[in-house]
Image: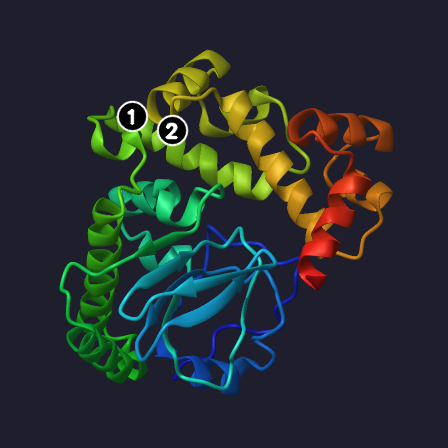
Amino acid sequence: MQEFLTNMNNSERIDLTTKDHIQVCRTSALNDQFKEIDVSRRWPYFFILFAATENATHCIENEKVTVPLGHFLFIGPDRFHAFIEAENDHFWVVCFDYGFYARTPNDAYFIQNTALFFDLSKIYISKPSIDIAEYVTLQFEFLEKLIDRAQAPLVRDIIHNAVQAMLIRSAFLSQGLHSSDVQHTNAEDKKIATRFRELLHLKYQSEKKLDYYANAIKTTPRRLNQAITNVYGRSAKQLVTEKIFEEAKSKLAHSALTIKEISYSMGFTEENNFSAFFTKHSGYSPKKYRNLQVSLSMG
């Protein structure tokens, strides 16, 4: 099997620019390679888990999630998660990065916008369109055998198409597609939206003004906002704010940084400004939110 997850830690973010990795294996094989997969971390990869032998449990953001036998669980790179029973083979695991999936502009648009991975308000569990767990297991076994030859273009096409089919079917069956995924969106708007999301992943901590993103995309702030609103139904400024807020929640819940250190890491010059921002959007002060998350993790 390919080794591609190295020196991972809680600060790593998804790389939207360079890598091209895919892995298909059972839970125990993943644990043999990377160790301590039962420790909550933000893996910089997309995960599809399939409960192959019985109801299985996974931990996402300090919450235990039960996946019924024969169902998929989808986890995006923006979430902390851990394999509760790392030594057992309850799950088949598909683990890949943006570079593997985003082979075309349409692929890039889909993987960045499907709710399966990026709707952080929900956890998506989906039943396969084929109601036979044994058949789906055979698909995973076939893909696992291909992994060692994944650098061959034809083999890579087969693996990519299989992963794509899982995602598209599950997105429709779970009604997990955003309205923008099913409506006819202008191709230029989709191109702008895709590039904006890529930049936002990389620059949200230091760049909060739309002028930066518009200049980088070689458009105007007005045109950028128009495209983002057409695609997402929300303004570009709202997406920037949502990104900062979600990252702040994650750091408060999962890092050992002080609130002051978190505020600076998020680009706030004063801790009071960060506290006011966080309280406005969560209803809790950063300290109270952190204490609540600690209570959840211990409970």
Q: 10 Å neighbourhood of mark 1: few (<14), some, or many (≥20)?
A: few
Q: Nearer the viewer, residue 91 or 200?
A: 91
Rendered image: mark on residue 188: 1
Residue 26 placed where, x, y %? Answer: 38, 81
Q: Which secondary structure lies at badge 1?
A: helix
Rendered image: mark on residue 192: 2
Based on the displayed image, in which of its 4 quarters is residue 242 positioned?
top right
Identify the residue at image location x=67%, y=55%: 296
Based on the displayed image, in which of its 4 quarters is residue 59 positioned?
bottom right
Q: 10 Å neighbourhood of mark 2: few (<14), some, or many (≥20)?
A: many
Q: Nearer the viewer, residue 18 or 120?
A: 120
Residue 39 placed where, x, y %? Answer: 63, 72
Residue 84, above or below 276: below
Q: Is residue 148 left or right of residue 95?
A: left
Quadrant of the rendering where the N terminus is positioned: bottom left
Identify the residue at image location x=51%, y=80%: 86
Q: Residue furthest front?
A: 299
Residue 19 placed where, x, y %? Answer: 44, 61
Based on the displayed image, in which of its 4 quarters is residue 22 positioned?
bottom left
Q: Which secondary structure lies at badge 2?
A: helix
**Residue 12 visible (yes or no):** yes
